Image (spheres, rainbow, N blue to C red):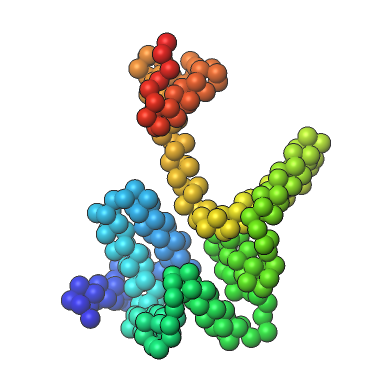
């Protein structure tokens, strides 16, 4: 074990020490820490999205601390230790890479992905004997991510569109149904149900096109922020605010931001 990791484990044990530890750290349990763990994982993703390696280093440290925190609490209960966590993932990686650590052969990354999924499927069957195909897809996952995983599991069981055209057709079908509910003045719960169906179909499109819906939406969120900020800045240059501009003017500035992003100058006055 490296000196830094040994030091980190020592710091965590001290923070949880009943006599000289930190009152806040001592009061925590798995459930209270879980939201912080999720938050740190998202901050890792954000640093990657921004291509900020300095921030990535820091955020990975924060995420590692979360792993150490959970392992420390488990050790206090006699359940498992940090070493057990590390040993478990080592065993799993070696088991799932028989072409690297064993005698199996794979011809490509795609073939390895197929083999990986088959190994995972067999592990799930052994772990959840008698349970359904979707039984262990965590309910706590972000909804779009879980939708992709549910669709993937169903696909492995043969329940899927054979071609992407079927997915696109389903999206159009759900959009038409949503439009009909909205135009009929339906109860909000029915509209919400149709919105959910549409989002689930979009998640399936992400799966078929090998896109991460969370990453795709994060990029679009960032793009929206950039373009909206452009509207604010252009109005500010004229000594005006959003309240001074109508929708048509803001829409024109939005289009201007799009042209600038594409390397095309603003439309001449």
The residue nearer to you, when weighing 88 against 70, is 88
| Residue placed most toward the observer, 157 or 220 | 157
Question: Which corner quadrant holds the C terminus?
Answer: top left
Residue 168, position as x, y percentages in the image: 66, 49
Instruction: Kindly indicate the quadrant of the structure image that contains residue 25.
Output: bottom left
Q: How many marks?
A: 0
Q: Position of residue 137 (x, y in %)?
A: 59, 70
Q: Nearer the viewer, residue 104 or 160?
A: 104
Q: Answer yes or no: is residue 75 visible.
A: no
Quick check: 246 left or right of 181? left
Name the residue at the front extreme.
Answer: 107
State left or right for residue 67 relative to residue 54. right
Q: Residue at x 54, y 62 (%)?
A: 141
The residue at 57%/68% (across/down) is 138
Q: Residue furthest left?
A: 3
* Residue furthest to the bottom: 103
Q: Residue furthest top?
A: 269
Residue at left offset 33%, top offset 68%: 64
Q: Relative to 71, is 193 above or below?
A: above
Residue 59 in view here? yes
Q: Residue at x 47, y 42 (%)?
A: 221
Residue 206 located left or right of residue 161: left
Q: Quadrant of the N terminus?
A: bottom left
Residue 143 in percent (x, y) is at 58, 57
Q: Nearer the viewer, residue 219 or 118?
A: 118
């Amino acid at each position: 074990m490296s000196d830094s990791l040994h030091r980190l484990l020592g710091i965590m044990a001290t923070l949880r020490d009943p006599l000289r530890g930190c009152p806040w750290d001592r009061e925590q349990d798995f459930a209270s820490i879980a939201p912080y763990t999720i938050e740190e994982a998202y901050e890792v993703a954000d640093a990657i999205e921004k291509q900020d390696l300095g921030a990535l280093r820091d955020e990975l440290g924060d995420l590692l601390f979360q792993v150490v925190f959970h392992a420390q609490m488990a050790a206090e209960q006699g359940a498992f230790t940090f070493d057990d966590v590390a040993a478990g993932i080592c065993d799993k990686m070696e088991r799932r890479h028989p072409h690297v650590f064993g005698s199996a052969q794979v011809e490509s990354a795609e073939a390895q992905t197929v083999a990986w999924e088959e190994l995972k499927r067999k592990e799930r069957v052994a772990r959840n004997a008698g349970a359904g195909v979707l039984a262990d897809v965590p309910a706590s996952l972000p909804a779009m991510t879980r939708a992709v995983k549910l669709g993937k599991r169903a696909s492995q069981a043969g329940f899927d569109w054979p071609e992407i055209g079927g997915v696109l057709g389903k999206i159009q079908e759900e959009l038409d149904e949503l439009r009909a509910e909205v135009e009929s003045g339906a109860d909000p719960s029915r509209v919400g149900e149709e919105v959910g169906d549409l989002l689930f179909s979009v998640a399936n499109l992400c799966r078929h096109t090998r896109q991460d819906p969370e990453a795709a939406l994060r990029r679009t969120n960032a793009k929206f922020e950039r373009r909206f900020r452009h509207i604010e800045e252009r109005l500010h240059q004229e000594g005006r605010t959003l309240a001074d501009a109508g929708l048509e003017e803001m829409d024109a500035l939005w289009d201007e931001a799009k042209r600038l992003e594409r390397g095309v100058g603003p439309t001449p006055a």
